[in-house]
Image (cartoon, rainbow, N blue to C red):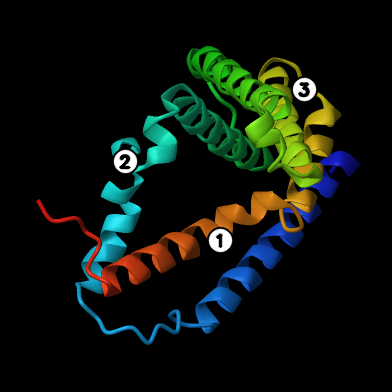
Amino acid sequence: MSWFILISKISFALCFAFCIYTLFRIISLGKPKDYAKTKGDINSSIKYSYTGGMSPVKKESAYLHLPTYIAGILYHLGTFLSLILFFLNVLGINLTNYLIIPIAVFLIISGICGVSILIKRIFKSELNSLSNVDDYISNVIVNVFQFVTIYYLFYLTPTYFVISAVLFLYLPIGKLKHAIYFFAARFHLGFFYGKRGVWPPQN
């Protein structure tokens, strides 16, 4: 086994172990301590938080900035697809030529979306003032990962596995770990607004 493939596998193992540890730590904390009187259906609210509550028409930050919202969705889908391709590569599963081209095209689009989001963060004062170094590093790493994945679809290169290792090692310590906290955050939102009878909204 080549050293760069070994490094990427070790990095993923460390990342996976940390994610599992973090997940169990969150679960062990239990539900939020909220002493307010229950006025609604908490379970329905939690379901809504993961479904209808994610709709752009229900989120002011989304429907007021639809191009950025759509770019963000494509960007995340490209990231998930790139991770799936990494696991397929490690397992030795090769893609057919009929799949490589459309996948590469989609990753080009998602990568461009990622770059556009980074540019907007840099030059839009409202976003720039709220950003820190971690925001930029995380974005750059994922952007590079997606573009290197495109290159790897056509040309084998050790750089692909090195960048993958960097991504896996940075995920547990940077904002990329929101991939884990996302689920807990949505649960807490559903719990909070369900207890107060705000979610799910009544027609």
- Mark number, residue 4: none
Ranked by sequence position, the earlier of labels 2 and 3 is 2
Q: CA distance from mark 1 to mark 3?
A: 34 Å
- Residue 181: numbered disc: 1
Q: List x then y, in percent, for residue 35.
A: 37, 87
Which of the two discs, 2 and 3, sits closer to the camera?
2
Query: Cα distance, mark 2 to mark 3?
Result: 39 Å
Q: Amino acid at mark 2?
A: Ser
Q: Residues within 10 Å of mark 3 (few under 14, many from 20)?
A: few
Q: Secondary structure under badge 1?
A: helix
Earlier sequence position, callout 1 versus callout 2: 2
| Mark in the foreground, 1 or 2 | 2
Horizontal and vertical percent for residue 29?
53, 82
Distance from disc 1 to disc 2, alpha carbons, whole Å, reads 19 Å
> Which element is circle 2 on?
loop
- Residue shown at 55% from the left, 17% from the top: 109
- Whether 38 is drawn above or below 185: the answer is below
Mark 2, Cα crowd under 10 Å, few <14 / some 14-19 / many 20+, is few
On residue 55, which mark appears? Answer: 2
Residue 130, picture quadrant = top right
Which three-letter amino acid code belongs to the residue tagged 1? Tyr
Left or right, residue 69 beside residue 100: left
52 up-or-down from 190: above or below = above
Q: Which comes sooner in the sequence, label 1 or label 3?
A: 3
